[in-house]
Image (cartoon, grey):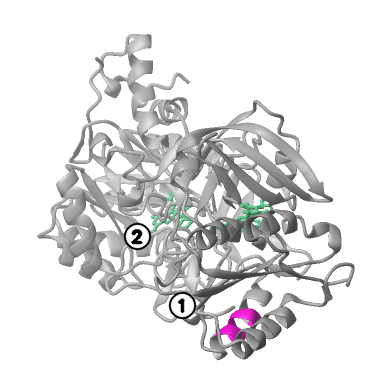
Amino acid sequence: MGLEDMQARVHANKQLFENLWLMELECPSVAANIMPGQFVHLEVPDLQANILRRPFSIFDRDEDAGTVEVLYQAVGTGTRAMRTWEPGLVTRMIGCIGRPWEVPYDTERALLVGGGVGAAPLNLLCQELMASDVGVDVILGAQTEGALVCRARYERTCGREPACSTDDGTYGREGFATVLVEEALARAQAEGRPYDYAAVCGPEPLMRAASQLLMEAGVRCQVSLERRMACGVGACLSCVVDTASGKKRACVDGPIFDAEEVLWR
Amino acid sequence: MALMNVDLGGLSMKNPVTVASGTFAAGREYADFVDVAKLGAVTTKGVSLNGWEGNPGVRIAETPSGILNSIGLQNPGVEHLKEHDLPWLSGQGATVIVNVSGHSVQEYVSVIEALEESPVGAYEINISCPNVDAGGMAMGCSCASVEEVVGRCRTATERPLIVKLTPNVTDVTEIARAAEASGADALSLINTLLGMAVDIRTRRSVFSRVVGGLSGPAVRPVALRMVWQCSGAVSIPLLGMGGIATAEDAISFMLAGATAVAVGTANFANPHAAADVVDGIQAWCEEEGVEDVNELIGGLIC
Ligand SMILES: Cc1cc2nc3c(=O)[nH]c(=O)nc-3n(C[C@H](O)[C@H](O)[C@H](O)COP(=O)(O)OP(=O)(O)OC[C@H]3O[C@@H](n4cnc5c(N)ncnc54)[C@H](O)[C@@H]3O)c2cc1C
Ligand SMILES: Cc1cc2nc3c(=O)[nH]c(=O)nc-3n(C[C@H](O)[C@H](O)[C@H](O)COP(=O)(O)O)c2cc1C
Ligand code: FES
């Protein structure tokens, strides 16, 4: 599929918790073609001083309705402006960009680990794995109970609650999601059904630590990396990631990388 | 239909619009958005003899109406350009300007020599990149070094030689005259303005090399002024750039003296920008009864 710069119309935009928001956008082509792990480069209109687009993963899609959902955290000028978008607002986005998650075809059991908004690009993958009868375990980490905004969605997809951790102990296990990763690995081992594949997305220290654990256990592991992006289409070289085979562009050679390839910062 | 073709120092362009080096790779990444054959030329990313790694750490920062970059001329080297990019560009029917980089005068010459048999319309000698230590801007800031590098490149090729100037000098016209006197067929300007951004939390610069290059709408007035100054100082044609995002911007550069223009940072905001500028100039000429786009060049009334 080639890239397209498309019109996207806001359908809904609601606050889920503090600075976490969910936006529904009408964009039939992205809804039809997005592959799990890919992202869109979204224009934030009417910000004279901010000329770049912003990259966002697609959290969910409804192909029939022609809509997609973006789960976003308001952290800076662009994402704070997005909070004010009303239904009907029209913007543009380039899609569908990047390398998707690549699950080995013979995978029987997979582990998905999402920290914070890092849970967003794993949801479509979770749906796809469930649909192809792969055993899926999900671990979600967040700072506090309220920030576990994806919990219900994953529960709906998987038919059971994901394992959760919060930094402040208000929900699930207190501490970082890596503890749950260790436990999941031990349990899978004990059950004699080890993981064949793991996908991790979240803050870089989490991805680094979790992928380390997973690789040590012999699990093929992929991560989704964030870099500052200008073009979003592979032309400007602003988003490079150091890998075992040299510098790679996060936008089009990623954002999904094999964890064993990544030379962490 | 207004006549759109221009002659940039011997490079025949079907319209006055190219893209700014480093913002468009070699065109393929934008092929879904822009038919490269529709542009006056495609200007490729700076290329060195054996390739460079580029800079570590953060490479881009948004600033008011602009961006700072510290890419550091990452490129895979001239052989890669010859094998992968130039054949594709010529297959598409594009006119090609190759942006040439070097750490030394000899490296610029060697890159040109390596390309002499390849389908290249013109060379753009980048003596103005602020993001590398040797070569780049270091060579574009004194008349003596400009004369040396341009003079040596001149003897290496008969093809049109465009010399790309840095705005980070006291008097850009002095450098422009030195380049003209050394055999340049055209000048392009401006490269990025030296800038900086500080992360107050870490008390460090955002960039590993501390400074970066500013581009985008924020630099447009400075670029326009420098094009106008140079047009009064030299008689060779100018390729104007710096913050051009629309046909109106492009036309203002032509009125200030540019024969052609380049669209750079604007590609990031709008992947169709370069093609939109071509269409916009065409439409504007028709509306205004301009029969030949060349009528605009230097048409500023002072
Ligand atoms: C492939 C990819 C997918 C992403 N998916 C999501 C998602 O689903 N939900 C979500 O909330 N966030 C996501 N992000 C991060 C999101 O792009 C940034 O939070 C956002 O760009 C911040 O913009 P701002 O204007 O609010 O921040 P500002 O700090 O004002 O932005 C200034 C500049 O820095 C860039 N920038 C700032 N933070 C980041 C960052 N963490 N990553 C990349 N660029 C950044 C901005 O794009 C902009 O160019 C993703 C990033 C990438 C690379
Ligand atoms: C990301 C980026 C990479 C660039 N790389 C090069 C380069 O390789 N060679 C060069 O001569 N100029 C390079 N430039 C400078 C541009 O070609 C242009 O001179 C400058 O950005 C001003 O134009 P603009 O404001 O339209 O971008 C680069 C600029 C940017 C933003
Ligand atoms: S953002 Fe331009 S190459 Fe990745």
- Discs 2, 1 touching: Cβ within 8 Å: no
Residue at 46% over, 25% down: B248
Residue at 31% over, 63% down? B47
Q: How far apart are marks 2 and 1 (CA)?
A: 23 Å
Residue type, mark 2 in image: Gly
Q: Is the magenta stretch mostly helix, strand or loop?
A: helix
| Figure check: A130 above or below B250 | below
Residue B58, quarter of picture: bottom right
Looking at the rendered structure, which numbered label has been put on residue A243? Answer: 1
Tell me the mark number nearer the camera, choosing from 2 and 1. 1
B240 sits to left or right of B107: right
Identify the residue position indicated by label 2 in the image. Answer: B46
Where's the N terminus of chain B, which quadrant?
top left
Q: Bounds of the magenta span? A: A209-214
Mark 2 within 8 Å of ligand 2, using the beta carbon: yes
Tell me the crowding category of disc 2: few under 14, some 14 to 19, or many 20 or more residues within 10 angstroms, Cα based. many
In the displayed structure, does residue A9 sit left or right of residue A150?
left
Mark 1 chain: A
Circle on res. B113: none
The residue lying at 52 percent from left, 40 percent from top is: A93
Residue B61 among magenta residues:
no
Chain of residue at mark 2:
B
B96 w.r.t. A128: above or below: above
Q: Residue at x 66, y 88 (%)?
A: A186
